[in-house]
Image (cartoon, grey):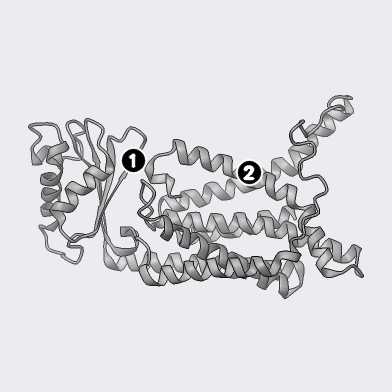
């Protein structure tokens, strides 16, 4: 189960590396290295350390529980299968609501998928992203505008807009920079000229420190690559599960469950869009988050599948409903522990990270 869960995560990392660009490839590389190193330390180094201390008659009294966790989820007997119909109906309703909402309204897409321009602007003082967005939106009319804080001091923001993205004239970039300068004048230091504002080497008083353009054709390529990365991840994981467990039921079950997870994540993005006080744009980083969630989700499923297969071999005459219940109950503690430990890390990233990483 340990090998299978790590291999499935490596599959998503490999696909993310091949279909991603720039920072996403860096993230995929870090993910794969982390998985390999974590597997090596967990399987080999941990065993070597424990064997060394045990031979020295040390750590003999060490326990892995506390007073709080000692009796937590010890030999649970939850009737998961007894409530499978109610659970199925509940999740089906949630899934249909998410799918319907996505088809009606869609999601807020970044310029990675729509095409547009990014400007990283640095100020002398703290500027709220929403304040900057309102100033720019007034100047750019009906064009989509989003502003995200970079870092935690709120002195640097990333402005994204698809304003006149189809215009390929030689002067359009200069015109947009001039419009941006006029829009942000109220939050710039006094006496900052347009020349200083657009000077990438100037980092005082408020200026553009970098810019990037994503044309419509490039945006289409990124969108297609994102679609294929998610689809191929699901197919590759399904095939791996089929080869390892030699039962198409496990393979189909895992793909259906992962597809459901993906749709529900997208649905949650839709429902929270406009409610949370930070951007929930669909960008390349979001696709990385989706594939990471797929890899994490399949980890737990592989452990449960492995326990089901084990119990089928040990108790071939046991009632299948009871066997499934036993498999879920015996892996419940592991599921809760890994989920809580991951949640703690995500909460730290969410609270301490900047606006640009909170959506991830």
Local packing at callout 1 (Cα closer than 10 Å; few below 14, some 14-19, many 20+) is many
Q: In the rendered structure, which disc, 1 or 2, sits on the residue that comes first in sequence?
A: 1
| Circle number at residue 150 | 1
Locate residue 300, reporting x and y percent: 68, 55
| Circle number at residue 14 | none
Could you tell me which secondary element the residue under label 1 belongs to?
loop
- How far apart are the two marked residues, 1 and 2, measured between alpha carbons? 28 Å
Local packing at callout 2 (Cα closer than 10 Å; few below 14, some 14-19, many 20+) is few
Residue 297: name its quadrant. bottom right
- Is 327 left or right of 175, judged from the image as shown? right
> According to the image, label 2 marks what residue?
340
Q: Reply above or below: 92 against 343.
A: below
Q: Reply above or below: 195 against 275.
A: above
- Is 70 left or right of 30, judged from the image as shown? right
Please identify, in this view, whether the residue under mark 1 or under mark 2 is nearer the observer. 2
Q: Which residue is drawn at 18% across and 49% down?
A: 136
- Is 165 left or right of 178, judged from the image as shown? right
Q: Which residue is drawn at 33% across and 40% down?
A: 150
Taking the image as drawn, is residue 244 in sight?
yes
Could you tell me which secondary element the residue under label 2 belongs to?
helix
Q: Residue at x 16, y 64 (%)?
A: 168
Q: Reply above or below: 209 against 258.
A: above
Residue 321: name its quadrant. bottom right
The quadrant of the rendering that contains the N terminus is bottom right
Locate residue 179, reporting x and y percent: 12, 50
Residue 130: name its quadrant. top left
């Amino acid at each position: 189960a340990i090998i299978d869960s790590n291999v499935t995560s490596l599959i998503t990392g490999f696909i993310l590396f091949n279909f991603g660009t720039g920072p996403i490839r860096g993230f995929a590389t870090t993910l794969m290295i982390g998985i390999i190193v974590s597997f090596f330390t967990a399987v080999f180094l941990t065993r070597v350390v424990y064997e060394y201390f045990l031979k020295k008659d040390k750590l003999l009294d060490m326990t892995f529980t506390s007073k709080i966790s000692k009796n937590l989820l010890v030999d649970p007997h939850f009737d998961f299968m007894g409530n499978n119909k109610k659970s199925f109906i509940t999740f089906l309703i949630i899934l249909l609501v998410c799918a319907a909402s996505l088809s009606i309204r869609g999601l807020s897409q970044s310029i990675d998928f729509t095409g547009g321009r990014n400007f990283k602007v640095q100020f002398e003082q703290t500027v709220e992203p929403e304040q900057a967005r309102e100033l720019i939106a007034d100047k750019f009319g009906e064009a989509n505008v989003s502003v995200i804080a970079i870092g935690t001091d709120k002195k640097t923001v990333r402005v994204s807009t698809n304003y006149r993205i189809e215009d390929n004239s030689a002067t359009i970039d200069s015109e947009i920079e001039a419009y941006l300068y006029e829009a942000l004048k109220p939050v710039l230091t006094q006496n900052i000229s347009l020349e200083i504002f657009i000077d990438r080497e100037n980092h005082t008083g408020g200026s553009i420190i970098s810019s990037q353009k994503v044309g419509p054709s490039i945006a289409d390529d990124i969108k297609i690559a994102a679609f294929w990365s998610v689809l191929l991840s699901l197919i590759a994981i399904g095939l791996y599960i089929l080869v390892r467990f030699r039962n198409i039921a496990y393979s189909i079950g895992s793909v259906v469950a992962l597809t459901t997870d993906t749709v529900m994540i997208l649905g949650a993005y839709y429902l929270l869009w406009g409610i949370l006080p930070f951007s929930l744009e669909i960008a390349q980083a979001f696709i990385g988050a989706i594939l990471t969630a797929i890899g994490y989700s399949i980890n737990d499923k592989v452990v449960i599948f492995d326990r089901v297969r084990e119990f089928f071999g040990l108790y071939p005459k046991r009632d299948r409903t009871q066997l499934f219940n036993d498999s879920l109950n015996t892996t419940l503690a592991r599921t809760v522990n890994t989920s809580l430990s991951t949640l703690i890390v995500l909460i730290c990233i969410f609270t301490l990270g900047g606006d640009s990483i909170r959506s991830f």
